[in-house]
Amino acid sequence: MSASSWFLVLGLVQLGLAWNVLRPVRAPASAAILSFFAGWLVGELALHALAAQLLLVAVFAWLGAFAAWPGLAGLGFSMVASALLVVSQRRATGAREAVEATLRDVPPALAAPNPALGTGLLVLPFPVRHAGVVSRKHVEFHRHDGLALRLDVHRARDHEGHGPALVYVHGGGWVIGHRDKQGLPLMHHLAAQGWVCVSVDYRLSPRATFPDHLVDVKRALVWVREHADELGVDPAFIAIAGNSAGAHLASLAALTANRPEYQPGFEGDTSVSACVGFYGIYDFLDRRGLFPNRGMEILLERQVMKTRRADAREAYDAASPVAQVHAGAPPFLVVHGSHDTLAPVEGARHFVEALREVSRASVIYMEIPGAQHAFEVFPSVRTRHVVNGVTRFLEAIRVESQKARAPSARTPVRSSAVSAARRSAPA
């Protein structure tokens, strides 16, 4: 095949990838998964993709691909794809406005500069590192039937005293994923500012059956509190966060603090001071029919719950954060992308509505325009703005928690600026 014909094919591929970023496919399940993988990196690294396209145009021009009509047609498709990537990049920069609108009542002074996500990492996003952060890895916190569960600890190189902690739960559909590949931009950013961030393992399906995953997360929370002095952690302020399946587990852990059925054979305080969920699944029963295809239902029935939803509605309900909301829930920040093909954004909205109806604490919803699933796994324009926003939320909650614990405290946390944001932020 001639260079001209090759570039025609290449131009069509470029156009398809760029179009998929803006109009992802949600059904059937196989197409939704392909749409996610095809649009994830291209969407978050739109400028990188644009640079690659321009380089290919230069190479094929040198090969004489544009001397015949197929090459010219391919060039036209490539130009349209480039324009769509520019649109995608503009949407990504719009994350800043979305974050600011959500947190308009949270004091900007609480947002420190973002050293973890500087220009260098936006140009070369892999691997995620920070010169001021040190990591202690592969620390075993529990062993179950010969399987070692481990955690990684990230904190500032010059960390002293006892700082706030964030326990991070990775995603991966409850069946895959690893603690050292997810949540790093957020954890490194917080660690550089004095937080101690702990990324934890949990048993994965199909070996594990729910609630095994949740039990392991709670074991990790107990371990962090028991080793607070060693880690330099203030045990009075431990927040939890997670992405995808990790958001589901983090939310459940936050909503079921100290429930004995999820702490078999061990005791300890599993309460948290705040919870941040990135693009999670919050309703296993899918009571509003929001799943766009049967993929999630099949995954839960065959791998995670190991029983049909119709035969175990009570168990599915117990595994659903939306069914566990209560007045004493800790402050929540729910983050979700508008273009998520794996976890429907409508589920996050419904979860936020349910929380706001009963919770006395802050409930903030941050919907990121154009963002796919897993958008914040590595540094990108969206990640930079969202990480800053999450930091503002957590720091605001921490400051209010300190005020509430102070002997002279007079004003309850509910009347804080964060609670004002809760009341005004759109769902």
Image: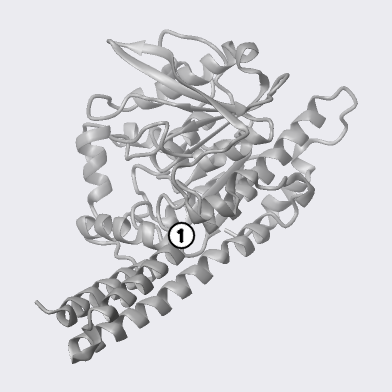
Residue 238 at least partly seen: no
Q: How many marks?
A: 1
In the rendered view, tell whether residue 201 sits above or below residue 115.
Answer: above
Q: Residues within 10 Å of mark 1 (few under 14, many from 20)?
A: many
Furthest toward the left, the residue is: 1
Query: As displayed, is residue 45 above or below residue 396?
Result: below
* Image position of 111 (left or right of 14): right
| Residue 293 location, quadrant | bottom left
For the C terminus, the quadrant is bottom right
Residue at (62, 57) in percent of width and height:
99
In terms of depth relative to the viewer, which is nearer, 377 or 217?
377
Which residue is located at x 75 percent, y 40 percent?
A: 414
Q: Is residue 424 above or below residue 377?
A: below
Tell me the quarter of the picture where residue 162 sits: top right
Q: In the image, what residue occupies the spot 23% across and 52% down? A: 294
Q: Residue flagged by tag 1: what amino acid is it?
A: Ala
- Furthest residue in direction right, as rendered: 408
| Residue 136 screen position, x and y as percent | 51, 21
* Percent x, y of residue 396: 73, 41
On the image, which quarter does residue 301 sit in? top left
The residue at 48%/46% (across/down) is 278
Task: Check disc 1 and report the residue beneath it.
Answer: 371
SS at mark 1 in the image: loop
